[in-house]
Image: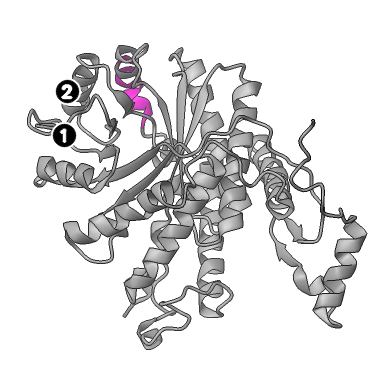
Amino acid sequence: MEKAHPWSSFKSSSPSEWRDKILNDLKGKPIDSLTWNTTYGRIDPTEISDHFNEISFKSTEEISWEFNADLALNTNILEVLNNGANSIYLNNIPYKENIFSSVMNDIIHTHVNINELSAEDQYSWINWAQANDFSGSIRNTIHPSHLLQNDFVQNSENFKKLNGKLEDHVMNCLFIDGDYFSNRIFEIDYELAWLCSYLNELIEYYLINKIVIPKKIIISTSLGTTLFENIAKIKSLIVLANTIIKVHNLDCAIEIETSFNQVDISPIEKEHHILRLTVACMSSTLSGSKRFKLGSKDAIFDGDYWNKIACNIPIILKEESYLFRNIDATKGCYIINQLEKKLADSSWSKFKMIESNGGFRSTNNKKQFNEVVEENSKKRLHALKENKKMIIGFNAFSTAEDQIQFNNEMKTPLYLQDLIS
């Protein structure tokens, strides 16, 4: 006997019936009161949107911890792994023999950014990678700021030689520093457009200079505090990046690496950050990113105890809330589908406009990128000042609002801590 579908006993409702029910619940308010405007289109939560992203879905696999200094590095790595992280990220830290003492690199993921190190230190890390076969990545890519300034050209031969030594290694990757754009551009469609232009420029640079493009492309991006928009952002980014890969006829796998956006870390009433971090982590795993990256910046206070509290957020979501499953739980969620499609369409349109103006590097001579960054910083400052962007424990529901100085000198990127007197 065929088993009945679990929802078969419920009467289905048409879109018009749902709309009538919403109107009834609004008790006289217009249905337009539920909609809102974004730079990528008007969002209507009553609109029925088809599922947009049809690429394969895999949930977050790595809980990663970032290190930016080599002070007591080995001890700190062991503490973080003991706290539950299964991945470490060493950001421009010179190689030393004792870094991995008692660290079982064969069962964790090890990521090393060597971008800003000396040539000697870069080769030390590459020699370490060649002597091992660990999971993770060695990241040696032209940073967006260097690409804009063209100051990498003089080292192009050394860059090509370094990448050649890792050509067939499992840790070889093309690293796309999307955090650079997340920290500077307030409007998400513009952020994704410039990130994609940077990705496209790097691919073209590799092809022109006959550098073999790695099979693995890692794209980092940072997240804010809006769950649905975060999810739509990551899913849109996956679609956009894969489209660029397809245009260039490349056989590459995309890995998305997420973190909480540092510009929105409040220096006052920091305990609220636990909730913000939880939203970012939930967004990360529900959208199919490969890893969620944490660091001491995410801990409320200094010390291993507070690092452990931060590290426990993804662990609880994984072990107790069962979010880390290879199921696209947002498939069929009309509002996310709508956000994703409109965001991807707007980002792609803006990306094509950048490319028609000469691409990422050419915009530096025309000062287009800097103008977008400055304009976005002004919009972000205005949104904070007018409470259009409300951050609880900072400019909303805070006992320390008198500490905020919106007339402070504007910087790019603009961090919340820059607005504290």
Question: What segment carries the magenta color?
Answer: 152-161
Mark 2: few/some/many CA within 10 Å (<14, 14-19, 20+) = some
Marks 1 & 2, CB-CB < 8 Å contact? yes
Which element carries disc 2, helix, strand or loop? Answer: helix
Instruction: Locate residue 234, reporting x and y percent.
Output: 56, 44
Whether residue 154 is in magenta: the answer is: yes
Q: Specify the amino acid type for callout 1.
A: Pro
| Residue 39 in view of the camera | yes
Q: Is residue 413 visible?
A: no
Residue drawn at x 53%, y 67% as measured from the top left: 380
The residue under the point 72% across, 40% down is 52
Q: Is residue 153 left or right of residue 297?
A: right
Residue 218 in the image: above or below residue 367: above
| Residue name at image x 56 percent, y 44 percent | 287
Residue labelled with disc 2: 124
Examine the residues drawn in magenta and state their main secondary structure. helix
Placement of the N terminus among the 4 image quadrants: top right
Q: Is residue 212 left or right of residue 55?
A: left
| Horizontal and vertical percent position of residue 403 | 35, 84
Q: Which residue is mark 1?
A: 94
Numbered circle sitting on residue 224? none
The chosen color scheme is one colour
- Tell me residue 183's x, y (percent): 44, 54
Q: Amino acid at mark 2?
A: Ser
